[in-house]
Image (cartoon, rainbow, N blue to C red):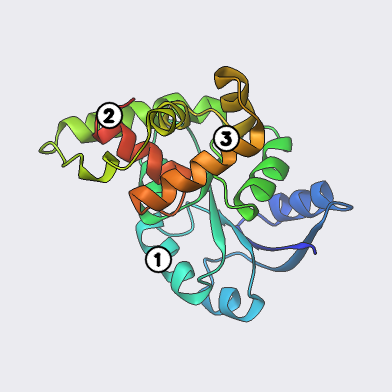
Amino acid sequence: MAIRLLLLDADAMFRSGVRRLLAGDEVEVVGEAGTADAAMAAACDPDVILLDANLDPPVEAIPRLDAAAPRAAVVAVVAGPNGDAAVDAVRSGAAGLLLREGPLEDIREAVAAVAAGDGFVPRPLAAPLLRRVRAMALERPAASAAGLDGLSTRQRQVLQLVARGYDNGEIAARLGISAATARNHVSQILLKLEVDNRIQAAVAAVRHGLA
């Protein structure tokens, strides 16, 4: 079954480029708009929403879209690695991030990853994002580590690699396990930490000193 994709981006050329890129893939563009249109999200019932984070502040746009299309995963497109939009998008529930100036192939990978329940952060964005999250964590009182108590030693190892930006295949290679096992560990980690995606798990790992 094709992944149902909604494009919300002010740049019509960018939207057209995404459609061309994904032509022939198992992706159906079910709608597009130049605004963060919650009504369109509700009507289209997408699996994935590709959102220009500059349309509205992510802290406002993503919750509106989540409410309108609760089963959709949001991938936020940000202008650069060092701004607030990426952090705001993660904190607001984005399942993935993309750099607007990044390679087009990242779009294909991000859509497939979040549709499968994974997260996606391009490598150039991972390090700046983690630095900002660490800085934010240091500014706050130490959080309770109770949410991590249920993790096994192996799951803690997996979580550390998730927090460093590794995907399931890379985690599997580093730990000498199968990709399916790595994915199962990530799923269990999300359940135990009571978070929605691996980006939020990475934030939890940083706050609790595991990354």
- Residue type, mark 3 in image: Ala
Label 2 to label 1: alpha-carbon separation = 24 Å
Residues tagged 1 and 3 counted as in contact (Cβ below 8 A): no
Q: Quadrant of residue 102?
A: top right
| 2 vs 3, front mark | 3
How would you rate the neighbour count of disc 1 (Cα within 10 Å): few for under 14, some for 14-19, many for 20 or more? some
Q: How many marks?
A: 3
- Residue type, mark 2 in image: Arg
Mark yes or no: residue 99 visible: no
How would you rate the neighbour count of disc 2 (Cα within 10 Å): few for under 14, some for 14-19, many for 20 or more? some
Tell me which numbered mark, 2 or 1, is placed earlier along the sequence: 1
Q: Is residue 87 above or below residue 5?
A: above
Q: Quadrant of residue 98?
A: top right
Q: Quadrant of residue 184?
A: top right
Q: Residue at x 10, y 38 (%)?
A: 141
Q: Is residue 54 above or below residue 5?
A: above
**Which residue is label 2 attached to?**
134
- The x, y position of residue 186, in whole percent, is 50, 41
Q: Is residue 35 above or below residue 107?
A: below
Q: Residue at x 53, y 46 (%)?
A: 96
Tell me the quarter of the image containing the C terminus: top left
Q: Residue at x 38, y 34 (%)?
A: 152
Q: Which mark is residue 106?
A: none
Label 1 to label 3: alpha-carbon separation = 30 Å
Q: Which mark is residue 182?
A: 3
Residues tagged 2 and 3 counted as in contact (Cβ below 8 A): no
Tell me the quarter of the image containing the N terminus: bottom right
Q: Residue at x 57, y 65 (%)?
A: 72
Q: Which mark is residue 63?
A: 1
